[in-house]
Amino acid sequence: MIRRIDHVSIAVRDLAKAKAFFIDVLGGKNLFEAPVPWQKFRWTTIELGTSCFIELIDPLEKDSFVQKFLDHRGEGPHHITLQVDDIQETHRRLEEKGIPSFGLAEPFPGWKEMYVHPKHAFGTLLQFAEFRPLDWINPGYIPPSYAEFAPPDPVGKGEEGTAVQRVQGDKGPEVEIRRSGQRVRIPLSQLEDLLQTLKKYQPASESAEGNS
């Protein structure tokens, strides 16, 4: 149900000061920044290390929900966002377990979300979201935590429709070989050992030709 923790959202009064701390002091990388005029706030996504991100949210108007949060609780963590594969399935699962949720909607094209109130999640506002991660950061850079969502890296194409490409597996980079609708994946770290093993089965005549 849960794919990964995507980010921890922090409400701040002064975005410039917050960015200076998380980027200039801690060495973070600004991945994306955008205002949401109809909700009267702005979000900034910052990468710190190789795990989940930090999201800074700051108010654009005095009556925004972020400003109300700041007035009531001050600066600090606002919510945690959990990426899910299927928001409807997650909603159904929570209902089955008797966990109330609210705000099920698609406020942006390609971003489906809902929330669980802090009183049902041990004091933490949880946001569940179904989305394609690379659509929500600036293009041209793939963070390590988004490596699994990167498009395949073509390696080459053999004869008779055999395609070979580098892909990101669950445990690291792999080489994927496809032919006639069949597919096999080999961990990149084991590729050299496999090639050496295959050479042992190469006919002597072919081996001699290859060395000539």
Image (tube, rainbow, N blue to C red):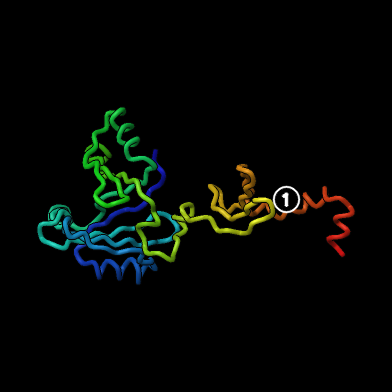
The image quadrant that residue 67 belongs to is bottom left
User: Where is residue 191 drawn, in percent x and y?
Assistant: 68, 53
Front-lying residue, 121 or 165: 165
Q: Residues within 10 Å of mark 1 (few under 14, many from 20)?
A: few
Residue in front for this viewpoint, 158 or 54: 158
Left or right: 195 in relation to 16: right
Q: Quadrant of the C terminus?
A: bottom right
**Residue 16: x, y in percent?**
25, 70
Instruction: Farthest residue to the left: give it.
Output: 63
Residue found at x 63% / y 44%: 180
Picture coordinates of residue 210, whole percent (x, y): 83, 60
Disc tally is 1
Q: Residue furthest front?
A: 160
Does any portion of residue 196 appear in the rendered image? yes
Q: Indicate left or right for 124 with 64 as reference.
A: right
Q: Is residue 119 above or below residue 69?
A: above
Q: Amino acid at mark 1?
A: Leu
Front residue (pair 97, 23): 97
Q: Secondary structure at mark 1?
A: helix
| Residue under the image location 30 percent in, 58 percent down | 55
Q: Position of residue 114 (x, y in %)?
A: 26, 42
Quadrant for the N terminus, please. top left
Is residue 66 shown above or below 20?
above
Name the one closer to the observer, 16 or 94.
94
Say left or right for 194 vs 147: right
Residue at the disc numbered 1: 194
Instruction: State whether residue 123 appears in this view.
Output: no
